[in-house]
Image (spheres, grey):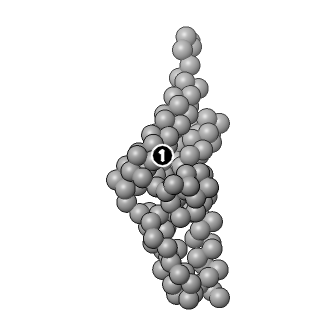
Amino acid sequence: MFYAFAAQAVLLLHLGFIGFVMLGGWLAIRHPAWAAVHLPAAAWGAYVELSGRICPLTVWENALRVRAGQAGYQGGFIEHYLLAIIYPAGLTRTVQLGLAALVIGVNAAVYRRVLRNRHPRGGS
C-alpha cells in the first residue's frame, strides 16, 4: 500500500514539475527570485525532451509501482500519461522536439518580459 501511494505521489510531483517547467516563469514576472529555481527546471525539461532521455521521476515512479506489485510502463511520463490524450498516435522524435521547442519558446517569451520589467527603457 505504501509503495502504491508513493508512486501516486511521484506522479503528482512529476505533473507539478512539468507544469512548473511550462508556466513557472510567470512567477518570475512578479517575483524575480523565482527565476533562480525556474530556469534550471526549464533547462532540465528542455534537455530531457531534446536528448530523448527518460526523466528520473519516471524511473522512480515505475520502481515504486513494481514494488507495489503493479506494472510499470515503458517510455516516459508524457508518453504514458499525456500523449494518449494530446497525441493518440504516440510519441515520435518530432513530437519530442516540438515539445522542447514549446518549453523553450514559452520560457523565452516569459523571461523577455521579466527582463523588460527589471530594466525598463527610458528610465532615469
On screen, residue 77 above or below 107 = below
On screen, residue 10 above or below 93 = below
Q: Using the image as rendered, state which of residue 76 and residue 114 is in the foreground.
A: 76
Please identify the quarter of the rendering in which residue 34 is found.
Answer: top right
Point 56% across, 19% down: residue? 120
* Secondary element type, mark 1: helix
Instruction: Report the quarter where the C terminus lies.
Output: top right
Q: Residues within 10 Å of mark 1 (few under 14, many from 20)?
A: some
Q: How many marks?
A: 1
Q: Residue furthest front?
A: 89
Residue 84, horizontal then vertical, whole percent: 58, 58
On screen, residue 93 above or below 61 = above
**Image-based side of 16 in relation to 76, left or right:** right
Q: Is residue 50 visible?
A: yes
Residue 79, horizontal then vertical, whole percent: 50, 60
Point 57% across, 41% down: residue? 25
Point 62% across, 39% down: residue? 26
Q: Using the image as rendered, state which of residue 31 and residue 113 is in the foreground.
A: 113
Q: Residue furthest left?
A: 51
Q: Using the image as rendered, state which of residue 26 and residue 70 is in the foreground.
A: 70
Point 65% across, 88% down: residue? 1
Residue 96, horizontal then vertical, whole percent: 43, 49
Instruction: Return the residue at label 1.
Output: 99
Q: Is residue 49 visible?
A: no
On screen, residue 3 above or below 32 = below
Task: Please state which amino acid type lies under the numbered disc 1.
Answer: Leu
